[in-house]
Image (cartoon, rainbow, N blue to C red):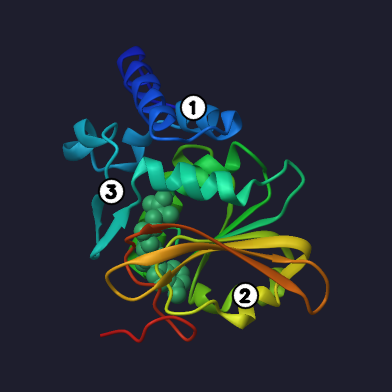
Amino acid sequence: MQADSYRHRGLRRALVEELRRKGIRDERVLLALATVPRHLFFEPAFQEHAYQDKAFPIGEGQTISQPYTVAYQTALLNPRPQDRVLEIGTGSGYQCAVLLQLTPHIFSIEFNPVLFERTRRRLAGLHQAAHLFCGDGSVGLPPHAPFDRILVTAGSPTIPRVLLQQLRIGGSLVIPVGNEHTQRMMRVTRESEAEFVREEFEDFRFVPLLGQAGWPKL
Ligand code: SAM
């Protein structure tokens, strides 16, 4: 990737050590976060904030997720190199670039057309070859289903059944579910055509998943 520097690599190593201390143990995920230059997903004026473990505004009322959250969700998702992964909520494209370190088969959908276009150009400029779509990802991406992994990076009121139906058997959905203040991280694994196993993890706070299977637009 372009425009990286010795100083930025050092800041990333320190961030990764911080994530390790906070409990992230998956070495593949830590390596991915050590590799992707998060500052290139910020506007130039704000790049100095990129290596703090914090979410940050990216415009349009949206945020780039906190590195801890990105690492946590990626570790739960556990994508293997052959997996087809759908990310719902492309946002800045940072999580998408992290996923691309783990498998080349990334599909990512963003609802907001301004963010979609900005991020499409950014990822192309960084030679990050994901399949990008603009639209309501709360209903998944039926023409490209099934997926081995689905990751939702916005807070959902429920676990949309339509997303479970787009999982391959053995595949899993990672999604934060709750109200507008707090959401519980959930992982749902499709054991067979009709059987799903649900696990619950930590609480987080995300911007809302909008759309047909999410929250209505205010
Ligand atoms: N993954 C992003 C990143 O790495 O920067 C962070 C995503 S931000 C926390 C959540 C994103 O989900 C926002 O960009 C928002 O516009 C998008 N979003 C909300 N509802 C959506 C929907 N129904 N379909 C697709 N994207 C949606």
- Image point 79% across, 67% down: which residue? 191
Instruction: Indicate yes or no: mark 3 CB to ligand 1 under 8 Å.
Output: yes
Depth check, mark 3 against mark 1: the one in front is 3
- Left or right, 169 with respect to 128, comes to right
Please tell me in which quarter of the rendered image ligand 1 is found: bottom left
Asked whether the residues under the numbered discs 3 and 2 touch, taking CB atoms below 8 Å apart as contact, a structural biologist would say no
For disc 3, the neighbor class at 10 Å (few under 14, some 14 to 19, many from 20) is some
What's under tag 2, amino acid-wise? Leu
Q: Earlier in the sequence, mark 3 or mark 1?
A: 1
- Which amino acid type is marked by label 1? Thr
Q: Which residue is mark 2?
A: 163
Residue 123 can be seen, yes or no: no
Q: Residue at x 68, y 50 (%)?
A: 105
Q: Note whether 27 is above or below 113 in the view shown.
A: above
Question: In the rendered structure, which disc, 3 or 2, sits on the residue that comes first in sequence?
Answer: 3
Q: Which residue is mark 3?
A: 55
Q: Position of residue 46 (x, y in %)?
A: 19, 39
The image position of residue 164, as x and y in percent, is 66, 74
Helix, strand or loop status at disc 1: helix
| Residue found at x 48% / y 46% | 72
Q: Quadrant of the C terminus?
A: bottom left
In the picture of the structure, the residue carrying the numbered disc 1 is: 35
Q: Is residue 76 left or right of residue 13?
A: right
Q: CA distance from mark 1 to mark 2?
A: 30 Å
Q: Is residue 109 above or below residue 26?
A: below
Out of 141 and 188, give the one closest to the viewer: 188
